[in-house]
Amino acid sequence: MPLRLKVNDIAFFERPLVFARPFRFGAVTITASTQLFVRVEIEVEGKGRATGASAEMLAPKWFDKRPHLTEAQSLDGLRRSLAIARELYLANRDFETAFGLHALCIGPQVAACAAEDIPPLAAGFGPAEIDKAILDALLRAAGASFFDGMAGNIAGIDARLTPDLDDAAIARFLATRQRLDRVAVRHTVGMDDTVEGEGGVADRNENAGARYFKLKLNGDPAHDAARLARIGGELAKLPYAIKVTLDANEQYADLAALNALAERLDHEPALRPITANLLYIEQPMPRDITRASPLGPLAARSFIIDEADDSYDAFPQARALGYRGISSKSCKGIYKSIINATRAAAWSADGDRYFISGEDLTCQAGLGVQQDLALGALIGVPHAERNGHHYVDGFADTPVDEADAFLTAHSDLYARAGGKVRLAIHDGDLLTGSIAAAAGFASSIHPDWSTMQPLKRPTPRVSQEQTV
């Protein structure tokens, strides 16, 4: 049963985040960033007040890859997205469902961000993070776990933003979800990562026993084919079956370049260990070119969009172009993921196969990884990219007491190893038992707010049109 609420306060905090080693994807290499934390206070109709929280790494040059922006400027756009969303959510003083509040704010959010030259994908970041914290507070007020609460549609998700669906389809999808007890880790192989030998893709100390691998591409068919051949040779040494996905992060310039890669995958014997186990190829071309480029014969393959997923219309538009899937990332919006999973299930019922995948934008141990894991386990994602556990050293610089508290509360999800609290990967899988038992959004505890700094204030941006 949906509950109604109003938001009394929203606060943003941050911690510095230093990577254990560089992570190169697309045109950017990350060695450090900032972890965002959101704290909200809400009043729930008939149930009193509650506090909720969420967390996410601020990823430079992913939401907005435009080359004229520095990494710092791209992060500033995310901070502005958060600040604008805060004003919109707090301005609504009536009781609303959690999804109803999101639906009221998302249009004005995108428009206000556009006026400051912030594109739609980055515009959605602010509401996505606030929505997670509101849902956490709502579930805590109701004394419900994420899975039980969503089965009853506690957030009131409806079809007002998606005319291709109806309310009954969404409610039916949520009511019939069966939580996945385990979600397999898909191990990320970044462009600068070691391929062979110690620390390479087949090293169990590196891949944690993963059976799924996500391989980054750089957009040059010859270079990518040669590197994939090396990776495939290493993966063939593993004593168990594996599956792979490829992710170009918008680096393939156009359909001609993408066709050149496909030709190599089809005809080069050295690539057979990859092609024989390939599940899908993710976001090969820039988002703007994607929208203008039907896949044609390439549609016979399984392609998905990720960075092009910047609106509630994105998946139907991509389907019309020949795409089969779309990614779920909690930083793009939990409600959009649920809506898209509903679509995939409905479209697949007609005989074709459509799907939603789990992709991680370096969710960190604690709230970030737990909430994203819960979302995937709800909508039926059997394996999900998990890169934070090896590009970042466990809980990184999180205070020891806080990391220990997460270990105690979620002992099936974390373990102490090498002096750090880290993700506990069980035969290549993450377990979801403790996050299912927690009242709230996938966590029985909150971080220690007293150990954080307020989020750095963003600089207002002016649109390019206004500067003419």
Image (cartoon, rainbow, N blue to C red):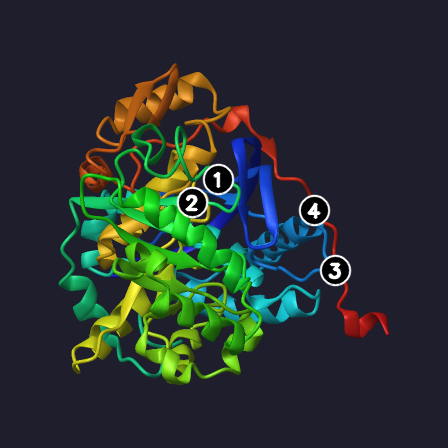
* Closer-to-camera residue (328/6): 328
Cα separation between marks 3 and 2: 27 Å
Do the numbered discs 2 and 1 sit on residues whose CB atoms are within 8 Å? yes
Cα separation between marks 2 and 4: 25 Å
Cα separation between marks 3 and 1: 27 Å
Query: Which quadrant does the C terminus fall into?
Result: bottom right
**Percent of width and height locating residue 189:** 42, 45
* Residue 287, numbered circle: none
Identify the element where label 1 is drawn.
Answer: loop
* Residue 189, numbered circle: 2
Do the numbered discs 1 and 4 sit on residues whose CB atoms are within 8 Å? no
Cα separation between marks 2 and 1: 6 Å
Q: Which residue is drawn at the image coordinates 32% and 68% (left, top)?
A: 339
**Percent of width and height locating residue 467:** 84, 70
Q: Residue furthest front?
A: 269
Sequence-first disc among 3 and 1: 3
Q: Amino acid at mark 3?
A: His
| 168 relative to 3 in the view: left or right | left
Residue assigned mark 3: 68
